Amino acid sequence: MEEYRITSAEQLCNLWKDVYSRKGGVDYSRLLPYYHDDIIFKDSIQELKGIDDFTAMTERLAKRSRDLEYIIHNAVMEGDLIFVEWEMVISYKKYPTSSVYGASRITLRDGKITNQRDYYDLWGDIFDNIWFLRKGYRRFMRKRFG
């Protein structure tokens, strides 16, 4: 019986990179056993509690995606805390391929992921890939927030 425990940042990164299966598209099934049943996940869009809601979110993402790749730029683990800087390259079924750049703060308990907070600029990264929205969105952001 395999024990599903995260023991290093490298192991976590390899699990994330394995989400895209060359044989059958996007598949989170090999990663999900490393998440605690009481996982709390939060990102720019949503906050989810529990493995059932988290699994449903991964299934929605997989369903919308033709393929998905995680490129890991940096990762560090100290104690039960892992920080990962990543790029998610997603090819949607109906939209152009986009890259979303972000970072995750992951908390472990007994080797299982209990808390994951993802930080990214979803709209900025998406609009940067749409030529007629890119300049206007960035101009708006500088004027209002920068």
Image (cartoon, rainbow, N blue to C red):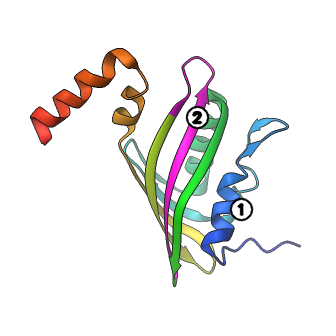
Quarter of the figure that contains the N terminus: bottom right
CA separation in Å, label 2 and label 1: 23 Å
- The disc, 2 or 1, on the residue closer to the chain's N-terminal end is 1
- Whether 77 is drawn above or below 100: the answer is below
Q: Residue at x 18, y 28 (%)?
A: 139
Instruction: Describe the element under mark 1 as helix, strand or loop.
Output: helix
Task: Give the numbered dot on residue 33.
Answer: 1
In the picture, measured across the screen, residue 128 lies left or right of residue 8, that is: left
Residue 64 spot, x, y in % from top left: 61, 28
Closest to the camera, between mark 2 and mark 1, is 2
Residue 73 spot, x, y in % from top left: 53, 58
Instruction: Describe the element under mark 2 as helix, strand or loop.
Output: strand
Task: Give the numbered dot on residue 90.
Answer: 2
> Camera-side residue: 104 or 35?
104
In the picture, measured across the screen, residue 31 lies left or right of residue 85, that is: right
Q: Give the residues in magenta.
A: 80-98
Q: Residue at x 55, y 64 (%)?
A: 38
Kind of residue sitting beneath label 1: Pro
In reply to whether residue 96 is colored magenta, the answer given is yes
Kind of residue sitting beneath label 2: Ile
> Camera-side residue: 63 or 142?
142
Q: Residue at x 24, y 30 (%)?
A: 138
Q: Residue at x 60, y 71 (%)?
A: 9
Residue 25 spot, x, y in % from top left: 75, 35
Main SS of residues in magenta: strand
Q: Are the two marked residues, 2 and 1, in contact with CB atoms closer than 8 angstroms? A: no
Among all residues in the image, which is located at the extreme right?
1
In reply to whether residue 109 is colored magenta, the answer given is no
